[in-house]
Amino acid sequence: MSQDKLWWYLLTPALLLDEQLALQQQEQRRQPQVLCENEGQRGRTVVQLNPAAIAAGIQRGMPEVLAQTLAPTLQSRDYDPSRETTVLQRLAQWLHQDIAQIALYPPNGLLFEVAGLRRLYGDYLELEQRLHQRLRRLGVRYVLTAGDSPLMARVFAQAGQSGVVASRSQRQQRLAQINIAQSLLPLVSQQRLQELGIATLGALLKLPEAELGARFGRAILAYLAELKGQLCPPQQWYQPPETFTERLDLLTEVSSWQQLLFPLRRLLQQLEAFLQSRQWSVTQLILCAYHRDKSQTQVTVAFALPLWRQRDMQQLVQLQLERHQLPSPALEIAVQAKTFSAREAQHQSWVAEPHTEKYAQHDLQALLGKLQSRLGEQAIRQAQAQADWRPEAAQLWQPQLSTEAAPADLVRPLWLLPEAQPITLDNWQLQWGPERIQTAWWDTEAVGRDYFIAVDAQQRQGWVFQSQQQWYLHGWFS
Amino acid sequence: MVGSVERVHNWRPIALQCVTNYSFLCGAGHPSEYVQRAVALNYQALAITDECSVAGVVRAYLAHKEQAADLQLIIGSFFRVPQLGTLIVLAKNRHGYGQLCQLISRARGRAKKGEYQVNPEDFQQALDDCFVLWRPCDESSFKEYAALLQQALTTRLYLAYARHFHADDATRYRHYESYQHDSGLPIVAVDEVLYPEPQRQPLYDVLSAIRQRQTVTQVRASLPPNAEHYLRSSEQLQRCYPQAWLREAENIVAQCQFTLHELSYEYPSELVPAGMTASMYLRELAYAGAKERFPDGLRSDVQEKLEKELKLIAELGYEYFFLTIYDLVCFAQQQKILYQGRGSAANSVVCYCLKITAVNPDQIDVLFERFLSKERDEPPDIDVDFEHQRREEVIQYIYKKYGRHRAALAATVIRYRLRSALRDVGKALGFNEQTLGHYLQHIDRRDQQLDWQQQLLAQQPGLAATQQGRWLLQLTEQLLGYPRHLSQHVGGFVIAAGQLSELVPIEHASMADRTVIQWDKDDLETLKLIKVDVLALGMLSALQRMLQLVAQYYQRPLTLASIPTEDADVYAMLHKADSVGVFQIESRAQMSMLPRLRPTTFYDLVVQIAIVRPGPIQGDMVHPYLRRRAGEEAVTYPSEAVRQVTERTLGIPIFQEQVIKLAMVAAGFSGGEADQLRRAMASWRSTGKLQQFEQRLIEGMRVRGYSEAYARRIYQQICGFGEYGFPESHSASFANLAYASAWFKCHYPAAFYCALLNSLPMGFYSAEQLLQDARRHHVTVLPVDIQTSTWQHQLVAQQCGYGIRLGLRFVRGIAEQQIQELLAQRPATGFTSLLALQQAGATPALIQRLAAADVLRTLSGHRYQSQWQSLALKSEQLPLFADGEGQTSKVQLPAPDEVSDIAADYRSLRASVKRHPLQLLRERGLMRGLRTAVELRHCRHQQLVRVAGLVTGRQRPGTAGGVTFITLEDETGWINVVVWAQTARAQRATYLTAQLLVVTGKVEIHGDVIHVIAGRLEDGAPLLQQLELTTRRSRDFH
């Protein structure tokens, strides 16, 4: 029976939350936490929950409001399937070290074709041990099942029947007992079958196929064929990416690079796995921190030697980051690596690199990018108009472009002083005013000023204002 | 600089454009605040000008009347016209006001609810008694339209210059001067007032952000740059504008002479036959009716009362009001629509004779005069309830009779409450929705000790430390009670003699084909305009059905008025709290009161209905009343005056009218003050107006020798009424329906349940609960069957009496029309096969639904087999051979076991008529040691018991101090469980989520009232899992 295929299926029912938990300190992990999703009329409901939440009596599918009532200290976040899929890809990449043929079932399942691996591992037990080991290290909750068809393996996983060492006949027996609700049939078919009193796959498999087809259509016949392995739809095997980009949600704001080192370690572990499976090494990383206002801070870290071990990279990254400061708290971080070299190849001198490149091809963006990486993100700025009544806030030097519209044409001096200077009004003659600006009460920099156009003794036209009994010069018209 | 050089010392300021919060999400001040502020600043005139609306003017008018100051109130409105800029229209006189209302109605009529659309042409016609003040949007607009507008409006057109220290003040000044130079139009100084005082700028900004559905920082460019748009002082205004422009404002003010006082309501005249006065006609109708109502002749005292009422009506000129309602109920009689009048004027001999109400005023001692009072001069109040499904016919009758230009619904102003205010302010300040939701969860609005801010700060102490948090607290508090939009009143119609839109603007409601006026019921009351309330009541539909069933099946034709009164059997039934389905006294609280109050007369029912309400409960009047009724406490009165008011309720004030009357006789309130108190009670929730009366009431009563404790209880009761005011007159009308439904329940239970089931959804109980109650009353309930059922439930003859055959409306997810078409094809002998069903027009999908509901038993076997067969039916045209595919299947599916069958019933029907799940559990020996509802009656008081049941209700009434009442249901009845807050907290998960609850606790037995005080709560889910039955039938907190 060696040519028979065997399929394993790995279901990670709380992948996204587990990933987030792995980044947390022990203490925080013990707090009840859930991920919620909007479910139409029912409002937000719980889709993933940690053991502490389960202990508090919270269940999957429960309305968030009820969960909050059961555990007042509950931390509730949004469930994002696309984010979970990203984590799943990372998981696939990680396991790709052991298994060549992996198919992704987003957002939380992986299918392995393992028959071919038997020769490599001798017996499935060893492969199973290895997978358990890796998954446990990641701290992910999972179900691992085996089936004679991909669908059978998935159905077992759905039913929570963990275990991969069983004979074919044992599997058939187990399959017959699976409840229709776990069959992975479309919901409508499940309901209809239940309404007929057909509660298990066993009962379904006993019915004559022609009559089933007449009542449920071809789809159910295709399902049965797939389940029995008579029909095997082609699988999209996982292809590891050519470049490495991984992003990590920090869940809370982190205000310094130092605090980012722990989460970075996880990304660098990922990178190590990436490099390991390809026998590559790397000399340059781009670290990116994402801020609340959608801006980002980039730091390029270069190594003198090609590296691939997480430990080595971590050390150097740590060293280099000590020189940098985070301009504002970060919500997410990412690690990118784009150029690689084979491990045995001689490393090139990266200092020589600029000479080989043609400056003519550099557009402004590239130049700016370079300047930014050398001088730091904040050193390169651009003048921006802002929609704000406060003159000093209406013209800003901003690190990146923003498309906000400015208020309509106002009488404003060409030259606005960086900071208003206190003056005495004796030397000035008021020409026009006041223009009263009282705004930004919501801000810490609320203002209340009466602006006038005035001329000084030298007949220069200036922009002056009064605020709290004191006069200031804020700009020059001429 | 454009200000005047010399100041006129005693010049009194004028505001010609004030935007109040009735320009929804725009102005940041109540109309009354503008009036108060203007009076304080010695304004000579104030124009209330909301955007395409006069919704706020009555509030301003009322405040103006209360202030009684030398301030002229001008009524107007402003419009944004895309081609023109802003136009402010002010009414010169009554005629001009009518023109303004017409203009608003036209503009609103063109757009969907809440919006309006105006064109330049609108200002070129029919505004000859209005001033139009124009702020052109730019030069080209001025050039294009100035001549046109000038031609139409001549000297009534002005350019309105505003200066609020903006950057473009000088440019605009120069423009306006050149406009004037070119056209000769006068310029008038018109401040654009957006809030009464500068401190409101943040609120204004937040409202703008809410309107634009963005945060304040996102919309900051569109916000005014400063806080200058308030009511400024004389000095400040003179600094801003040349004297000449201010004088133009004075000219305008001098010519505006209109006040809302001039509006008078003219009744539709077609109701009175030619050659008669309204008074004569009403008298004629009343006496004609009296002959029918009192076939044995009018008793002299009743006639005296009738005469007195007619005289009073004539004196106050309300004949047309009664005639209008008479006309509606005549229509209802013709159409055989059941109705019932209620309200202050309804329980009168006149209304009884006109058949507006069926409550014989002889049965209840309510003085008509008390409600229609000469000195208070307020419009009478009569609500008429009609059968729920048929109210629309009455509404259409009104539209048809008077026309859409003469009849429209009153508005209801939807206001900000804590939940909406905190959410909207929070979003505008940039809080995310989850955070706000979290905050709101921790606020218990019923907590009377801590206000919402204290509660929130207790949970989130950090909030006050941030600026954003402080703004959130402050601005939310300010926003509470602000109007948010107009909605339609449930059924209050205003009917005019001529064009309604000359009285008040009309706009679209969200419901298609409905129009609403811009004023709500308080506004109408202020202006003494009359509305007729046309409401819908589900119980009337049910009673109509009961009357029909009893006439048809028991050959006993009855009307509401001819149901035998004061039937001892009916009261005996109620003493046992056997009142499921009975109007108004079926709730759990009412049920537990019935055995204590033991109503034995109609008036007892009136009290019963009114006593289980927040008013008497908060005033701690319930127990004293019960003690006095039981003879455990002597009936005494603190004074003769109090005796007169409270004698009929044993010296304990129960009704709203009594409490108001007490304020007059015991605390010395004048008629006017009492009236203010009554109004404040109606609006306590939104404005907190009641507090101002607290001191006055308690002091007044103390001075007159009443104890402070008694006075405080009266005040508490007033506060309770503020939430759900419940007057005696309403209670009497409700008692009439309660008695009628109880009478049917007692004497014709099958008809009673059948009619109720056909009238769902209504009332307190689900179909499931009604069915259980029916069976406990030995009414046979037969399952739905395709061969005999109709759409509705119906009565069928049984060995003794009648049972109920459930109708197909019980099946979930099918449409009435489909079924009616199918049943029309049903042969007398019934259908013979599934194929026959299909040939009669049923779609395969419908047949599947019927099969799932186990309705096809007689046709194709049990529900599994029926469905298996029905699934083979194809929707294409069938080949014409008799042997349908359904019959050829070799598969024989096993029949469902009992549990699966019940579970399938719950899925496909609105209830199961099979056995109760708990009976199955008990049968399997899974409920040892657990007592049934019936067994509890034989327990000792304070005995420790364990009970279990499906949770059918969780209630936490605001009056019960954190106690939750849980209703459990088993196969024998209902068990009332009381859960103290502490128990609930300790066993929160079980308390909140269990569907089957196992309770260990103590029985409390007081007469016929049985409660279990919960000690331990267990989730019965494991038991249910044994049955693999999980149903969700609980009615949660509401």
Image (cartoon, coloured by chain):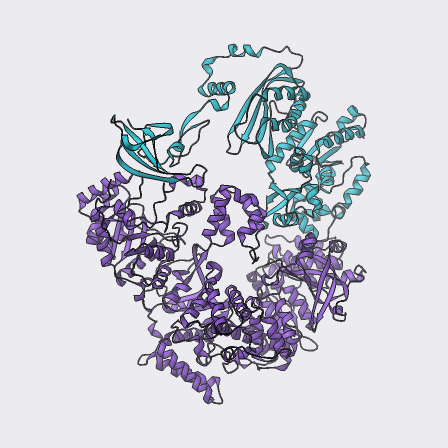
Chain colours: A cyan, B purple
Q: Can residue B342 be seen in this view?
A: no
Question: Residue A127: where, in percent of width, then height?
Answer: 77, 28
Question: Residue A57: where, in percent of width, then height?
Answer: 70, 48
Examine the image and state in which quarter residue B397 appears.
Answer: bottom left
* Side of A112 where B827 appears, left or right: left
Q: Quadrant of the N terminus of chain B?
A: top left
* Side of B661 where B913 appears, left or right: right
Q: Quadrant of the C terminus of chain B?
A: bottom right
Question: Residue B204: where, in percent of width, then height?
Answer: 40, 47
Is B580 above or below relative to A448?
below
Examine the image and state in which quarter residue B912 appears.
Answer: bottom right
Is B984 above or below relative to A164?
below
Examine the image and state in which quarter residue B755 appears.
Answer: bottom right
Q: Please tell me which residue lies in front, B11 or B529.
A: B11
Report the number of discs.
0
Question: Residue B28: where, in percent of width, then height?
Answer: 40, 50
* Side of A162 where B485 appears, left or right: left
Q: Please tell me which residue lies in front, B245 or A287.
A: B245
Q: Is residue B680 visible?
A: yes
Is B444 above or below relative to A260?
below
Q: Please tell me which residue lies in front, B926 or B174.
A: B174
